Amino acid sequence: MARPAPPFGNSTGHKSPSFRERHMTEIDRRSVLAGALATGAGLLAPRATSPAKAAAPPAGTQNPGWYRYKVGTHEVTVVTDGVNRFKFPDGFVANKSRDEVNKGLVDAFLSPGPDMVAVPYSPIVVNTGTKLVVIDTGTGEANFERSKGAAGQFHGNLKAAGIDRNQVDTVIISHFHADHINGLLTPDNKPSFPNAEILVPAAEWKYFMDDAEMGKQTSDRMKGVFTGLRRVFDGLGRKVTPYEPDKELAPGITSVASYGHTPGHNSHIIASGNDKVFVQADITNLPLFVRNPGWHLMFDQDAAAAEATRRKVYDMLAADKMMVQAFHYPFPARAYIEKTATGYRETMVPWSPTL
Amino acid sequence: MARPAPPFGNSTGHKSPSFRERHMTEIDRRSVLAGALATGAGLLAPRATSPAKAAAPPAGTQNPGWYRYKVGTHEVTVVTDGVNRFKFPDGFVANKSRDEVNKGLVDAFLSPGPDMVAVPYSPIVVNTGTKLVVIDTGTGEANFERSKGAAGQFHGNLKAAGIDRNQVDTVIISHFHADHINGLLTPDNKPSFPNAEILVPAAEWKYFMDDAEMGKQTSDRMKGVFTGLRRVFDGLGRKVTPYEPDKELAPGITSVASYGHTPGHNSHIIASGNDKVFVQADITNLPLFVRNPGWHLMFDQDAAAAEATRRKVYDMLAADKMMVQAFHYPFPARAYIEKTATGYRETMVPWSPTL
């Protein structure tokens, strides 16, 4: 059975001369494909196998982006808020040129086009058996119209996943950037989770609610961060519960300090039975920063600390083969990590069509 | 901003002594995590923020597995048939030991447990604008009950995706293994796509419908393949249309001979505008065989030809950065391929929450 194989292989088991003749000669793969594509003349004539029927219209809709998996007895639902596609600004990666960023995106198969980037947002919901817990909240429902449906999908997809926002007991916030907290408010600035306690990192609260820190800001972007988050927390009447690292915030959900991206940035570990998953928030943004851990995203407030945190956590994820749930990975945003010669590499966890 | 970062990073922007004290000392990552997990005592006391309400019950359901994307003006819907998890038999990879297979699965983050494998099935539906085309059909509806819902999901998920089987104009079959053809019949052995023309590879038809070839078979598995496919095609009254390679089978959908896995195995290219995707069928099974292209799956009928085809096609996919839609990759089963020192490596295409 080990004859030399012709282009695209051939078999030993049949004797059809027509394609033998065509394929037993050595032709290169490109000419095969070019040939295949050019053979418009080969279009089969339509057959009347049934009474003439109208062409099925395109569906034009996407499956609502939610995905469920178990961690021990905990039930985790990943609920996408959508994907923002935008022209990345100069300095998007502070220590890399625009050309290097473009090349990095192409090399990671993440480029939506020259100078463009596509950033996904994936909050999660954890049902611990006794508590319904949301971790981070997306860009906010008001953003759905603004973004023409590209993002601001979290609350809509939550509904599609059969989750009632009124049933949520606890919302855990990783850090205070808009794409993590804006979903705390409805478009008319009411609490999105009216019956939930809102847990925020103590260090984040202390830093960002400090008027002196706000007064020190010189960049428009950082001023906007302070103003934006205060608008959100004012909408909640500032009724939040600060939390420290290394605390169990809900059954099996523990905070882990992972500072750098912001002064009080926390990640979370969900553990149940023998299973656990590391919910990283923004230790990296896109997998671009997994493959290039030394690249400094413009939103990393303390880039050196963020990089040190990234390397430390990713070394751990790789060594322990621990699953990571990553806010800015492509939905459903679960992966395993391995170490490479130049950084790390993610392998997305296979989708299971059953729970 | 470039102070040395403590474990999990720290920031320069806050002054909260409590966690500074805890975190500014050098402790290793494992002790941090072990500590975090052990701190059950840190569980926050429940707060009565609202009248006592019952715990939300676990949802217990998975999102129906369908996903839509555009190739030019064509609309492709990937519709999972499910995932079979089973103990792999001796010889599952003909030229590798059980230990090597187990290690390969673990290294590729694809192991569901020792001696276990999980094989997904992802048929697709293409709306060309004028024709509704199904490529491969899954393990069959009758398998849904048999597998306790693990597989046989194709027809159910098709419905969830808003696609009416009666509207299907054309079914294209890549090859005659049961997981690709059994979905042609309903559980009561009627045609699943009553208004569709069924296109089958001419070489596959010639080989597998040849009684002399059937008579030559010595293994129970191969006898079963012949018997099984004849049952299916007899259920269709053998009303099929054989197709040759390099033909346009439906607008923008062209056949490409990719023999080896079976004698008449074909892949397909979907092309529209400047977009195209290579619908590989079984040029590889799991990404395990992408990373290890020299491994011979027991279902590769001519293993040497299958490997030659695999390497040739994957060299092309890598060189052209062409997207592959792969029947046995994890849902939604779309990836880009790059060449590595020892084989190839897939990068799953990011899920887009909008069409």
Image (cartoon, coloured by chain):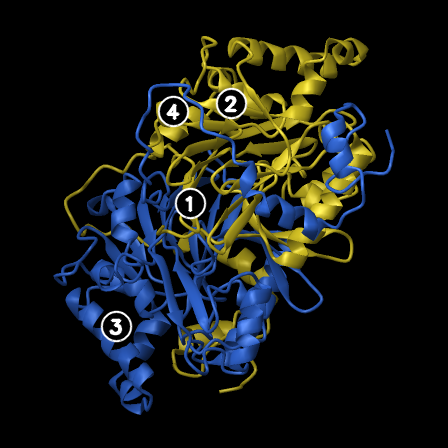
Chain colours: A yellow, B blue
Q: Chain of mark 4?
A: A
Name the residue at 54% across, 25% down.
A199
Name the residue at 69% across, 17% down.
A208
In the image, residue A206 sits, relative to residue A342, either above or below, namely above
Label 3 sits on what residue type?
Answer: Leu
Label 1 sits on what residue type?
Answer: His
The picture places residue A210, in percent across and down from the top left corner, at 72, 13
Dot 2: few (<14), some (14–19), or many (≥20) neighbours within 10 Å? many
Are both tags, 4 and 2, on one chain? yes
In the image, residue A198 sits, relative to residue B124, either above or below, namely above
Label 4 sits on what residue type?
Answer: Arg
- Relative to B308, A95 lies left or right: right
> Which element carries disc 3, helix, strand or loop?
helix
Q: Are marks 4 and 1 in contact (CB under 8 Å)?
A: no
Are both tags, 4 and 1, on one chain? yes
Q: Which residue is mark 3?
A: B229
State the CA–CA distance, disc 4 to disc 2: 13 Å
- Relative to B262, B235 lies left or right: left
Q: Which residue is mark 2?
A: A198
Counting residues from the start of the chain, the first of labels 4 and 1 encountered is 1
Q: Nearer the viewer, residue B107 or A323?
A: A323
Q: Are marks 4 and 2 in contact (CB under 8 Å)?
A: no
Task: Tell me, for residue A74, which label it has, or none.
Answer: 1
Q: Which residue is mark 4?
A: A165
> Which element carries disc 1, helix, strand or loop?
strand
State the CA–CA distance, disc 4 to disc 1: 18 Å
Q: Chain of mark 3?
A: B
Q: Nearer the viewer, residue B77 or A56?
A: B77
